[in-house]
């Protein structure tokens, strides 16, 4: 049996190769033989790590989702003040939209490119990432409330607002229908971030 370090490295290599083949050939047209040949590993080696192509595909999906969530986790676990965390978190969320949609034609681009033409699989990876991310965003808001940086009443509604707003943002970017809405990607980014950051502050006293 290979050492744990060698086994982990081999497994990552197989996933890297599979991801590239899924991007260039499509998931359905990629075979276990293709992955074996491209990774310079025999079929026996591949079956040591994965039972079948579906298991490889599921592992690639999981890794892609985790690569998204890790960026948010780094922010939430940082020492930044809660307001700075929220601003940075939202900026990164928009960066991921741009990287996913705008750069999806490049196999070497970071996120989700191998699913760019398959909306069912893209949705699967998005749902997996969103489920993990939701807990991190809720934690950020809870920490801001606990520290007194966020208004408790207004900030408590922000997780639901966040989910609904970014469903719209994702849809608009995916369908590139900014013109018919009279919007630009830059304006959406600016206005959404301003809105959500202001939403954690107390309302001004009534005049």
Image: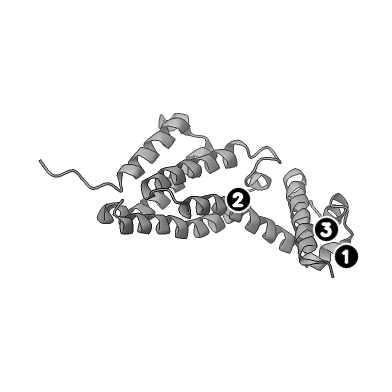
Q: Which mark is residue 44?
A: 1
Q: Nearer the viewer, residue 34 or 200?
A: 200
The image quadrant where one finds the N terminus is bottom right
* 1 vs 3, front mark: 1
Residue density around tag 1, few if under 14, some if 14–19, many if 20 or more, within 10 Å: few
Furthest-left residue in this view:
207
Instruction: Where is residue 11? Give x, y as percent.
Output: 76, 59
Q: Work out whether mark 2 precedes mark 3 in sequence or the reverse, and give the earlier one.
A: 3
What element does badge 2 sit on? helix
Q: Nearer the viewer, residue 207 or 3?
A: 3
The answer to whether residue 171 is seen in the rendering is no
Q: Are marks 1 and 3 in contact (CB under 8 Å)?
A: no
Q: Which mark is residue 146?
A: none
Give the alpha-carbon distance from disc 1 to disc 2, as whole Å: 30 Å
Instruction: Where is residue 146? Give x, y as percent.
Output: 32, 59
Residue density around tag 2, few if under 14, some if 14–19, many if 20 or more, within 10 Å: some
Give the alpha-carbon distance from disc 2 to disc 3, as whole Å: 22 Å
In the image, what residue occupies the spot 44% across and 51% down? 79
What element does badge 3 sit on? helix
């Amino acid at each position: 049996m290979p050492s744990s370090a060698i086994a982990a490295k081999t497994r990552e290599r197989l996933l890297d190769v599979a991801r590239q083949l899924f991007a260039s050939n499509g998931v359905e047209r990629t075979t276990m033989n293709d992955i074996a040949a491209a990774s310079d590993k025999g079929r026996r080696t591949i079956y040591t790590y994965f039972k079948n192509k579906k298991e490889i595909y599921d592992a690639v999906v999981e890794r892609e989702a985790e690569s998204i969530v890790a960026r948010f986790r780094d922010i939430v676990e940082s020492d930044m003040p809660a307001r700075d965390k929220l601003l940075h978190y939202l900026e990164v969320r928009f960066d991921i939209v741009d990287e996913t949609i705008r750069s999806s034609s490049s196999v070497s681009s970071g996120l989700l490119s191998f699913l760019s033409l398959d909306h069912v699989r893209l949705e699967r990876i998005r749902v997996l990432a969103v489920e993990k991310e939701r807990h991190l965003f809720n934690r950020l808001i809870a920490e801001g409330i606990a520290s007194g940086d966020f208004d408790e009443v207004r900030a408590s509604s922000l997780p639901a607002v966040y989910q609904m707003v970014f469903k719209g943002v994702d849809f608009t970017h995916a369908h590139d229908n900014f013109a018919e809405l009279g919007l630009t990607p830059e304006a959406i980014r600016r206005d959404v971030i301003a809105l959500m950051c202001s939403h954690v502050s107390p309302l001004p006293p009534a005049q």
